[in-house]
Amino acid sequence: MTKQRSIIIPRNLTNFSAVANLKIREIDLDGIDRCIISFVGTSFAEPLPMIALASDLRNLRTRFPHVTYVCRSRETAFRGYADHIGYFRFLGFSRGNQIGDASGSGNYVPIHLFDINKLKANAGDEPYGKIVSEESLRLAEVLTQSNKGGLFVAVEYAIREVFRNAVEHGMGSKAALLGQYWPTKEIAEIVICDNGVGIAETLKDYYDTDSPIDALSLSLNPGISGTSDLEREHQNPYYRNSGFGLYTTSTFCAEHGLFRVISGDAGVTRQSNNLNSHNWSFDGTCVQMKIRTSDLNDSAAKIQRIVEKGEEEAGARLSASTASKQTSLA
């Protein structure tokens, strides 16, 4: 007799806790032949929990490769959206568009899955940061349907700096991006994740941190980088790793919405002047950025002021790289 287990996905996937509460990482499928992933009751989802769920289900498949995994769903707005952007393919199921088939629109950037090793190989003698910048410009144009203006500047900068971090520091093989824009709410959301070693691991050789939470909090300060001074001396001056990318992006997003990073067994959320910690898990690093699209006319100037303040805080220790100071309108 076939033994099976079902995982019921919630009706609304609107926050990370909705996925964490499923406790997929604690599920034991020893002795189970078939696992049913049921989206039958799911009607709405946002980027962060969608990416988090994908990470947990991929982890489950890795731990129990002998199991047959079955996806069940019904015709809802969620399924139509998930089919279109390639989400079910991202989960490993044979339904909906392939990843990359959908071109995107002013309301969303469909799932983009990047092969980091291939991206690095294609860079040739060029700095990785240059290739990342080209991708960031393209993705920002899709989401904002423009190549200028305050919203474009903010979105392009946020994608570029976080994506650079994944490529240059994450030590992973894959990175994924999903973006959504809600014009009626005047909010843009971008989620970028990688399957690397995590932020705490990249910082441990350079900083004395007591916990993953401390490492994440530290990474949002100016001048914090998992790159040695000797390595920086040999890097391209324009794109060198200065430790200002996460600081600047998190500060800007906190002032205009929310910045959240989950890596390893910890998560922190920066919003306004508050920094909150979470006991969440993610294989690699996942960054969520929500930006209120109103009051962004002077994004370039605001980013420059944040960089300057960070350089003052870092003192003589380190200055931001030219790339981290540069906005698409500068």
Image: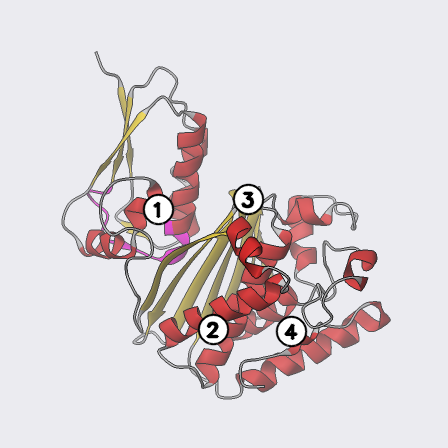
Q: Which residues are magenta?
A: 39-50
Does the magenta segment cover residue 47? yes
Q: Marks 3 and 1, how far apart in space?
A: 25 Å
Q: Secondary structure at mark 4?
A: helix
Q: Residues within 10 Å of mark 2 (few under 14, many from 20)?
A: some
Q: Badges 3 and 1: C-beta atoms under 8 Å apart?
A: no
Q: Which mark is residue 323?
A: 4
Q: Residue at x 65, y 77 (%)?
A: 325
Q: Amino acid at mark 1?
A: Phe
Q: Earlier in the sequence, mark 4 or mark 1?
A: 1
2 or 3: tag closer to the N-terminus: 2
What amino acid type should be assigned to the residue bearing mark 3?
Asn
- Residue linked to disc 2: 137
Q: Is residue 270 visible?
A: no
Earlier-in-chain disc, 1 versus 2: 1
116 part of magenta stretch: no
Per the image, the residue denoted by label 1 is: 90
Q: Would you say the residues marked 2 and 3 are in contact, meaning their CB atoms lie under 8 Å apart?
A: no
Residue 262 in the image: state x and y as whole percent. 54, 50
56 lies left or right of 94: right
Q: Are marks 1 and 2 in contact (CB under 8 Å)?
A: no
Residue that badge 3 annotates: 279
Q: Is residue 264 above or below residue 321?
A: above
The residue that appears at 39% across and 44% down in the rendered structure is 54
Marks 2 & 4, CB-CB < 8 Å contact:
no
